Image: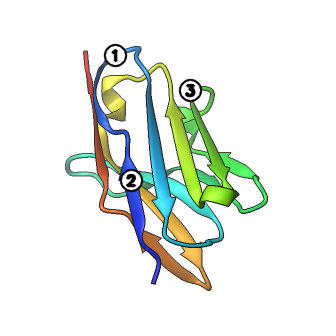
Amino acid sequence: QVQLVESGGGLVQAGGSLRLSCAASGRVGAMGWYRQGPGNQRTLVAGITSGGSTNYADSVKGRFTISRDNAKNTVYLQMNSLSPEDTALYYCNAQFWGINYWGQGTQVTVSS
């Protein structure tokens, strides 16, 4: 069983930045961040493999950067130029032996 603990969400003004962190309780494979806004489905924001290959949703390319520290089993999401459309509950995801694990979610609210 893998536990994921997220941190770093909060309230920020449009144009501001936030950095999310997610620490896994042990070694995992690919990791990523998803988000779910009110009335919307959970969608991928960014993903990163254990080797460091990344992918992003088109809506965040050039603004968000995902990275990881394998020694700490931690993934980060640096979010810049935030807009109200980025307001959502952000979930950390990790894959291990074909099983998806999820964090509890951290709220990001961007005011206009």
Q: Amino acid at mark 1?
A: Ala
Disc 3 versus disc 1: distance between alpha carbons?
A: 13 Å
Residue corresponding to mark 1: 14
Residue 109 sits in quarter = top left
Identify the residue at the far front of this view.
71
Task: Answer above or below: position of 82 versus 53.
Answer: above
Quarter the C terminus occupies: top left
Question: Which of 55/105 is in front?
Answer: 105
The residue depicted at 33 percent of the width and 39 percent of the height is: 9
Among numbered discs 1 and 2, the one appearing first in the sequence = 2
Residue 16 placement (x, y as % from top left): 40, 17
> Of 94 and 43, which appears nearest the observer?
94
Q: Which residue is mark 2?
A: 6
* Label disc, if present, on residue 63 of the rendered structure: 3
48 left or right, relative to 91: right
Which mark is in front, 1 or 2? 2
Earlier-in-chain disc, 2 versus 3: 2
**Dot 2, crowdedness within 10 Å: few (<14), some or many (≥20)?**
many
* Element carrying mark 3: loop
The earlier-in-sequence mark between 3 and 1 is 1
Q: Looking at the rendering, which quadrant does residue 85 occupy?
A: top left
Position of residue 27 relative to residue 43, above or below, is below
Residue at 79% in and 59% down: 51
The disc label shown at residue 27, or none = none
Q: Is residue 48 left or right of residue 33?
A: right
